Image: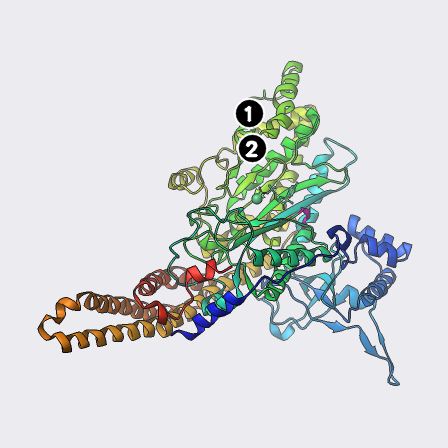
C-alpha cells in the first residue's frame, strides 16, 4: 500500500472544522492594529499629525524632528499592544513580501535597558538585502540597498511586530521593488488627470487611482498537499488524471460554503479587520474547492499593500485550519484556474468618480473624456498591458480557453458602443447651438440611464467596463497588483497628458470653445479605437483570427510577452512619465525572465523525478504482479492460459508502452534542460525552456495519467485529483 497517500487521506478525513467564534462586531475591531488617522490623532502631537497628513495628502516631505515624534508615538502605541519588534515591510521583486525584525529593546549600560525607536529607524534602514533579485542593478559586492518609509500606507501590527510599509531602492536610487514605480505612476496619473479635470471643475486639486481586487484561490487539505511534492514545490499539480466529476455540474459556484472553509474564511476576515483590510465578499468559485474574496476598493497603493499582506495572512490562517491556500494560476488541469480581477477607477478630491457618469451633461462629458482616454491608452499599449500580467503560472490561464485570452481587448457593452458611434458623427470644428443641445440631451445626457440597465457582462473580456470602473481581469492570482497597476496608471497618465495638449491647441489655434475642442478630439480618438473594442466571445477561435486581422498582439508565452517591456516605445513612455528609467526597465525584464526560467526549470525537475522515481517504479511493480499472475495461469492451465490471461497480457504490454514513452521523454527533457542551462543569453535561455523543455511536460503527463488509470489504486503513490479536490 502506498503509505504516504493513504496516511494523508486518513489524516485529512479526520480534520474537523476549527470553529471560529466572533465575540466583537467587525466594525469595532476594524483597523485596531493599524496606526491610522484615529490612532495618530490620539498619539501624535498636533504638529506631528499635521506633518504626516501633509505627507499623505499632498506628498510633502516629513522633516526630521517630526519623524522623531512619529517614531516615538508609534513605539508607544505598539508597546501598548504587546509588540516587541519592528520591521520595514517591503515588496521585493520576488513577488513575496519581505521583513527583517529588530527588537525595540536596547541596552543602555549598567545592566539597564529600554525600548527605543527613533526617527532614523523609522525613516530609513539598510537591510543586507543582497539576495533579492535586482536584475544586475546591484552587484553583490556593493549590495547596498535601502528601505524608506512610505507614510501614505499606514504602519500596522502583525503578530507581535510593528510593520512599516517601505519602498526598497538601490543606493544609486533605482527601484528594487514593486512599490516605488507604483508610487511614481500614481503621481503621474494624479498630475495628468488633475489637469484634465480642470476643464470641468477648477476646484479639483488631486486625482486618486482606486483599486478593488478580487482574489481567487484554492483551499486544499494540508496533509493531502504534503503528500504531493509537485504542489509542495511548484504550487500546482504537474500530473494527475482528472476526476470523474469536476466542475461539469456547476454545483460549486456560489454554492453553500463547506463548513471547514467557512471557518477559515471567518478567521481570515477577522484578521483582515484588525489589519484594516476592508474585506467584504466571499463565495465559492467555479472549480471544486475554489473560492473568492474581495474587499471594498481603496486608494491603489494601499490596496496593493493590502493584497500583498492578504496573500501572506491567508497562508498563515489556512495553516490553523489544516489547509493550504493555493494561489497558483492553474493548480489543476481540467478545471478553472485562478485570477485576480483588478477593478480600477479614478476619483477626485471633490468626491467625483471620473469613470462613473454624473447627473449633468458637463459631468458626463467629463466621464466620456476619461472613458475614451482610458480606452485609447489601452489601444495604444495593448502589448505592454499583456506583458504586465505575464508569468509562468499565468501562461496556463491566458489563452487556455477559460480565462481571458492573451489578446487584450476592451468590452464596453452595447449601449456605450452606441454612444461612441453617436459621438463619431460630431461635426468637425465649431458646433452649431442645435448640435450642442442635441448632443447634451440625446447623447451624453442619456448616459446615466444607459448605464443603469447596462447589465450585459462579458466574462470573457480581459478589460471590461463595468458601470463605474474598468475591470482588468487577466491578472494572475499570485501576482503583485502593483505591476499591472503601475502600467495602467502610467499609460492613462501619458494619454491624458497628450489629450490636454491637443485640446489646448484647438482652443488656442482654432478658437474653439472648451467643450467643442473636447468633442473634436474625442471624435478623432473614437475613430481609431475600433480595433481594441470587442464585444464577442473572447475564448473563441474566431476571435483569435479576427484579432490577428486587426493587428492585435497575441503573445501566448511569457518570453514572447515580456519583450514589450523593453521596447523602445515603452522605455520612452516610462522615462517621459518619470516612472522608470531604462536601467530599471531592463533590470525588471531580466528579473522576470529569470523568474520564468526558474519556475519552468523547477517544474521540469520535479516532473522528471515524480515520473521516473514514483510513477514508473509503481507501474513496474504492478506489471510484475500481472506477470506473476500470467505465469500462475500458465502453470495451472498450460496450453489454454493465453485465452484466460488475455486482458492481463494486453495490460502488461500497455504498461510497457507508457513506461517506454515516459523514460524516453524524461531523458529528452533532461537533455534539453542541460542545453538550456548552458546558455548565457537570457532570451535564448527562456525561449529554450519555453519551446524545448516545457512542451515535453505534456507527453510525460499524458502517459503518467494513463498509467494512473491502469495501475491498482492500492499501490498508486500520488494523491488523486478526486481526493485533492473533493475532501472538504
Ligand atoms: P464582480 O466583478 O465579481 O461582479 P463587482 O463588480 O461587484 O464584482 O466588484 C467587485 C470589486 O470591484 C470589489 O473589489 C469592489 O471593491 C470593486 N469596485 C467597486 N467599485 C469600484 C470603483 N469605483 N473603483 C475600483 N474598484 C471598485
Ligand atoms: Mg469581477
Quarter occupied by residue 520: top right
**Among the 4 quarters of the image, the one containing residue 274:** bottom right
Q: Residues within 10 Å of mark 2 (few under 14, many from 20)?
A: few
Where is residue 22? Give x, y as percent.
71, 56
- Residue drawn at (68%, 68%) of the image: 99
- As drawn, the residue found furthest toward the top would be 434
Q: Any magenta on residue 298?
A: yes
Q: Quadrant of ligand 2?
A: top right
Q: On the image, numbered disc 1 is attached to which residue?
A: 424
- The span shown in magenta is 296-300
* Residue 176 seen from this side: no
Q: In the image, what residue occupies the spot 62% across and 56% down?
A: 265
The answer to whether 507 appears left or right of 428 in the picture is right
Could you tell me residue 52's position as x and y percent?
A: 82, 54
With respect to residue 9, does 486 lie above or below?
above
Work out which residue is located at the far right of the displayed protein and give it. 46
Q: Which mark is residue 455?
A: 2
Residue 366 lies, with reference to residue 294, above or below; the image says: above
Q: How many marks?
A: 2
Callout 1 environment at 10 Å: few (<14), some (14 to 19), or many (20+)?
A: some
Q: Considering the image in quadrants, where does the N terminus appear?
A: bottom left
Q: Is residue 14 left or right of residue 78?
A: left
Which of the 4 image quarters holds residue 273?
A: bottom right
Amino acid at each position: 500500500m502506498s503509505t504516504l497517500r493513504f496516511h494523508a487521506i486518513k489524516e485529512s478525513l479526520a480534520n474537523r472544522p476549527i470553529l471560529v467564534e466572533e465575540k466583537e462586531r467587525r466594525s469595532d475591531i476594524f483597523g485596531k492594529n493599524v496606526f491610522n488617522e484615529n490612532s495618530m490623532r490620539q498619539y501624535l502631537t498636533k504638529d506631528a499629525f499635521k506633518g504626516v497628513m501633509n505627507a499623505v495628502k499632498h506628498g510633502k516631505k516629513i522633516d526630521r524632528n517630526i519623524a522623531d515624534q512619529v517614531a516615538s508615538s508609534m513605539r508607544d502605541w505598539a508597546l501598548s499592544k504587546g509588540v516587541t519588534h519592528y520591521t520595514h515591510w517591503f515588496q521585493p521583486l520576488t513577488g513575496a513580501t519581505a521583513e527583517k525584525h529588530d527588537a525595540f529593546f536596547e541596552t543602555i549600560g549598567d545592566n539597564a535597558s529600554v525600548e527605543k525607536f527613533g526617527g532614523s529607524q523609522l525613516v530609513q534602514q539598510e537591510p543586507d538585502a543582497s539576495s533579492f533579485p535586482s536584475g544586475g542593478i546591484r552587484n553583490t559586492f556593493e549590495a547596498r540597498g535601502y528601505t524608506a518609509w512610505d507614510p501614505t500606507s499606514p504602519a500596522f501590527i502583525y503578530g507581535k511586530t510593528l510593520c512599516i510599509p517601505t519602498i526598497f531602492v538601490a543606493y544609486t536610487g533605482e527601484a528594487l521593488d514593486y512599490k516605488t514605480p507604483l508610487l511614481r505612476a500614481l503621481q503621474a496619473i494624479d498630475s495628468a488627470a488633475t489637469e484634465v479635470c480642470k476643464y470641468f471643475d477648477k476646484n479639483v486639486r488631486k486625482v486618486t487611482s482606486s483599486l478593488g481586487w478580487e482574489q481567487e484561490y484554492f483551499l486544499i487539505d494540508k496533509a493531502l498537499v504534503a503528500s504531493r511534492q509537485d504542489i509542495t514545490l511548484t504550487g500546482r499539480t504537474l500530473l494527475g488524471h482528472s476526476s470523474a466529476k469536476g466542475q461539469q455540474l456547476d454545483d460549486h459556484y456560489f454554492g453553500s460554503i463547506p463548513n471547514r472553509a467557512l471557518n477559515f474564511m471567518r478567521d481570515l476576515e477577522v484578521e483582515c479587520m484588525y489589519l484594516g483590510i476592508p474585506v467584504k465578499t466571499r463565495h465559492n468559485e467555479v472549480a471544486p474547492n475554489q473560492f473568492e474574496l474581495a474587499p471594498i476598493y481603496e486608494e491603489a497603493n494601499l490596496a496593493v499593500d493590502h493584497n500583498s499582506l492578504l496573500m501572506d495572512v491567508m497562508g498563515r490562517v489556512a495553516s490553523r485550519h489544516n489547509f493550504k491556500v493555493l494561489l497558483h494560476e492553474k493548480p489543476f488541469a481540467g478545471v478553472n484556474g485562478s485570477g485576480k480581477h483588478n477593478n480600477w477607477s479614478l476619483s477626485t478630491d471633490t468626491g467625483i468618480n471620473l469613470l462613473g457618469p454624473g447627473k449633468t451633461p458637463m459631468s458626463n462629458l467629463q466621464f466620456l473624456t476619461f472613458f475614451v482616454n482610458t480606452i485609447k491608452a489601452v489601444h495604444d499599449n495593448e502589448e505592454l498591458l499583456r506583458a504586465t500580467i505575464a508569468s509562468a503560472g499565468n501562461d496556463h490561464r491566458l489563452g487556455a480557453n477559460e480565462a481571458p485570452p492573451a489578446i487584450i481587448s476592451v468590452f464596453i457593452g452595447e449601449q456605450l458602443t452606441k454612444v461612441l458611434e453617436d459621438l463619431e458623427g460630431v461635426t468637425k470644428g465649431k458646433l452649431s447651438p442645435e448640435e450642442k443641445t442635441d448632443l447634451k440631451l440625446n447623447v451624453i445626457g442619456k448616459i446615466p440611464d444607459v448605464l443603469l440597465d447596462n447589465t450585459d457582462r462579458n466574462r470573457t473580456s480581459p478589460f471590461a467596463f463595468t458601470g463605474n470602473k474598468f475591470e482588468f481581469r487577466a491578472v494572475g492570482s499570485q501576482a503583485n497588483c502593483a505591476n499591472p497597476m503601475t502600467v495602467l496608471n502610467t499609460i492613462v497618465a501619458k494619454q491624458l497628458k497628450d489629450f490636454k495638449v491637443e485640446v489646448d491647441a484647438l482652443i488656442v489655434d482654432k478658437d474653439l470653445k472648451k467643450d467643442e475642442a473636447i468633442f473634436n478630439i474625442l471624435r478623432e480618438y473614437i475613430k481609431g479605437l475600433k480595433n481594441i473594442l470587442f464585444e464577442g466571445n473572447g475564448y473563441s477561435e474566431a476571435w483569435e483570427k479576427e484579432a490577428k486581422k486587426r493587428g492585435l498582439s497575441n503573445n501566448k508565452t511569457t518570453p514572447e510577452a515580456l519583450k514589450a517591456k523593453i521596447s523602445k516605445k515603452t522605455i520612452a513612455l516610462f522615462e517621459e512619465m518619470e516612472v522608470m528609467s531604462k536601467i530599471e526597465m531592463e533590470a525588471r525584464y531580466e528579473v522576470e525572465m529569470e523568474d520564468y526560467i526558474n519556475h519552468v526549470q523547477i517544474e521540469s525537475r520535479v516532473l522528471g523525478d515524480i515520473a521516473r522515481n514514483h510513477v514508473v517504479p509503481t507501474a513496474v511493480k504492478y506489471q510484475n504482479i500481472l506477470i506473476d499472475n500470467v505465469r500462475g495461469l500458465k502453470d495451472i492451465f498450460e496450453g489454454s492460459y493465453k485465452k484466460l490471461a488475455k486482458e492481463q497480457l494486453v495490460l502488461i504490454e500497455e504498461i510497457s508502452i507508457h513506461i517506454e514513452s515516459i523514460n524516453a521523454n524524461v531523458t529528452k527533457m533532461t537533455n534539453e534542460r542541460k542545453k538550456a542551462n548552458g546558455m548565457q543569453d537570457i532570451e535564448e535561455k527562456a525561449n529554450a525552456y519555453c519551446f524545448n523543455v516545457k512542451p515535453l511536460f505534456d507527453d510525460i503527463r499524458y502517459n503518467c495519467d494513463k498509467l494512473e488509470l491502469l495501475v491498482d489504486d492500492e499501490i498508486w503513490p500520488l494523491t488523486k485529483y478526486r481526493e485533492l479536490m473533493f475532501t472538504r
